[in-house]
Amino acid sequence: MKWLQHPYFTKGLHILIWLLLLTVPALMLHGQDFFHLPPNYFLYSNLFHIALFYFNAYWLYPKLMTRRRWPLYPLALIALFSLSYRIKIAFIGLYPAYPVNEQNQSIVFFPLIPFLIASIIYRLVIDKIAQDRKAKELKTERLDSELKFLRSQVSPHFLFNMLTNMVALARQQSPLLESSLIRLSELLRYMLYDSAEGKITLAQEIEYINNYVALQQLRFSDQVTVETNIKNDSPESGLEPMLLVPFIENAFKHGIGLVTDPYIRINLQVQEKKLQFSVENNYQKGNSSKDRNKGIGLENVKHRLELLYPKKYELIIKDDQQVFSVHLKLAL
């Protein structure tokens, strides 16, 4: 309900309330000598009350209700009550035919109380709304900063692994080095430009995954069996960039080496804005391919999921010392 936050809605609501306050008494008391008060007394009195309402809400309360000045505020209210009462009495004094008596004195004094109380409540409400909005903006700024930091971690980690692959191909004098460098440039274009604006489309992420898997297969050739099953009926859905690849990267990193019949199985299904993703690989316990930088990618993704998709995802990671698997369910 964004229209509730529109500035014109707030202004219109104020105007409507004040129009009702001014017109209803005028219609109900038209032609009546209510408490023997001057003609149009309630009209002028309510206009004065409205001015008093905004004076307190936007000047007196903000000026005096501070850490140092708050003791002055009750004194100022008492003075305001006294001054307002005298002004209204003076207004009645302009009509000699309507003298002030005990009967109409209460009508002159009492309305000041609810108007000032309403003014204080109104000020408290708008201050609370402003505080909540500021807190939300600060939270968003912290979130953006944290996500930028997390993304900045992904790139060096990815490049470290990919350049390691290039070095391995260069040492082998592999004819696949040139095509690997071309695919690497495509991946870098994705990382530097396509994902720079925040979320990317699911189709872009899938293309990135395919390029990444193809690049790894260029290096490992028939050393590992890679099975991919990707079905996507929502290609334009938005997704945090490089959210899925770290799981695949982890599988290639730890599922290659001293492993008998290594395999990596990648499954991605998207239906009705619901993503189901899984990666499974076998590995050898104590595989020397693991390094001291392990876990950067996975911890990064966990953190980003918690920041961007709170209560919208389910992540299950299983490790039985022979097979490592990741299962992610995500509401897009």
Image (cartoon, rainbow, N blue to C red):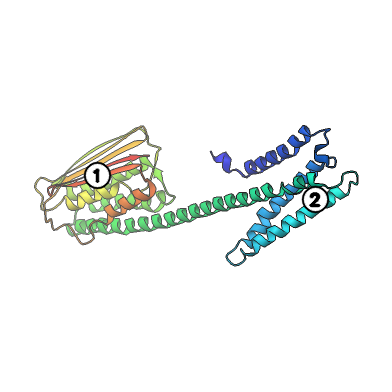
Q: Amino acid at mark 1?
A: Ile
Please name the residue shown 20% across and 56% down the image: 169
Relative to 279, is 2 on the left or the right?
Answer: right
Instruction: Inspect this view and state whether residue 77 appears.
Output: yes
* Residue highlighted by disc 2: 88
Instruction: Inspect this view and state whether residue 175 appears.
Output: no
Which disc number belongs to residue 270? Answer: none
Crowd tier of the residue under label 2, counting other residues whose Cα lies within 10 Å: few below 14, some 14–19, many 20 or above: some
Residue 117, percent from left and from top: 64, 50
Query: Of marks 2 and 1, which one's residue comes earlier in the chain?
Result: 2
Q: Amino acid at mark 2?
A: Lys
Residue 234, percent from left and from top: 37, 34
Q: CA distance from mark 2 to mark 1?
A: 72 Å
Task: Tell me the SS state at disc 1.
Answer: strand
Please name the residue shown 63% across and 52% down the image: 120
Farthest residue toward the right?
96
* Residue highlighted by disc 1: 316
